[in-house]
Image: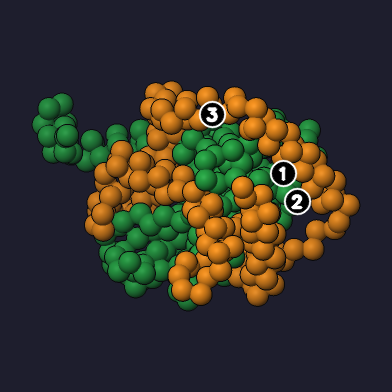
Amino acid sequence: MTIVERGAGAGLSDKWTYYNLHLSNGRVLVEQAFGISKQRWRVFLGKTGVTYRDGFGMTRDQKYILAWRVACILHNVAVTHLSMDHDDQEFEDELQTDAERVRLEELAERMAQRASEVASAPNKFPTDPTTASALEAGKVRREEVCEALWGARS
Amino acid sequence: MDTTHSIASKFDIGEATVDSAYWTVLAAIDKTLYDEYIDRLWPFSSAARDEAAQFFYTRKGCGIDNVLGSIDGVHIPITAPAEHADDYYNFKKWHSILFLHCVDSRRRHMYIAGGVAGASGDTTILSVCKLWKKIAWMIPAPVRAMEDNNMMGAGRVKRHARLCIIPPRTRIPTLHTSSHIFFQFRLLGDGGLP
């Protein structure tokens, strides 16, 4: 399921601002990944790309797609084997506290509960993300998460 | 930093040969490493899902449960094509091809869908890719939906947005088909997604 960040600003309640903050903290990872990939292969940086032409059995569009995909693969290879992300290591240390362990147990419990709930209910979600019902379903999910976050704050 | 020209003179071959070798190598990398370095990163097993969810739940300042990763679109700059150039003109006012990515906790790309013309939005990709249809709505997770990055040819798209199609490759059968647990998960996204 997709959580959506709403525009922060005037008129937004404390609850949603709090939600936005927490969502952004998780969402930065994807932006950082793009930033790192694009810096690694600077062809993709900025507004003007390289010029490819049809040839070697590929159209130019296919060449762009292939180039970007290979860039992503090599990015993954680099992250996996070179391990330049030091903050991941720090994060693993953080995990060791008792409070975190309790939270994890809670999480596991809630996951199991959720899994049984979902298994008993038929899948009633829209199959097309562009329809109004999909947006509605997304809104329901967001409120769920928002409530959970607000309730769990310390 | 070498240009095609400098490589050509170094090895005493034609520039076209260098270009040919370049694309051969790219195609080879894509063919051999794609499964291992992108496909396999998607958390299909319950252990992998738990791990991802734990990361985001315990991440400082995040604390949302059942999260597998974050999702967003990315525009890859291209030079304006001769035909249908307006379809590639994105909201940032340059020509691009749009991709939709899911990223895992280590900022690795674990899902790539796309190759649509830049004038489309993230939802355009979402409406045609298998991520939404098979996984996003709590259908059992072990569906290998990763062919999306190869075929974006089907489905409704914005006006005359031209889609790029790369012929599908043969796939290795999945190893993770044993798990049939229903599982609700979340992907953190921005305002462009439902």
At label 3, which amino acid type do we have? Glu
| Colour applied to chain B | green
Q: Is residue B186 visible?
A: no
Please tell me which residue is depicted at 80% across the width and 58% down the height of the picture: A123
Q: Quadrant of the N terminus of chain A?
A: bottom right
Between circles 3 and 1, the one closer to the viewer is: 3
Using the image, name the chain to which the residue with label 2 belongs. B
Please tell me which residue is depicted at 38% across the width and 27% down the height of the picture: A84
> Which residue bears the numbered disc 2?
B139
| Colour applied to chain A | orange
Using the image, name the chain to which the residue with label 3 belongs. A
Q: Are marks 2 and 1 in contact (CB under 8 Å)?
A: yes
> Which residue bears the numbered disc 3?
A94
In this rendering, the answer to whether B10 lies above or below A58 is above
The local crowd at label 1, few if under 14, some if 14 to 19, many if 20 or more residues have their Cα within 10 Å, is: many
* Number of numbered discs on residues: 3
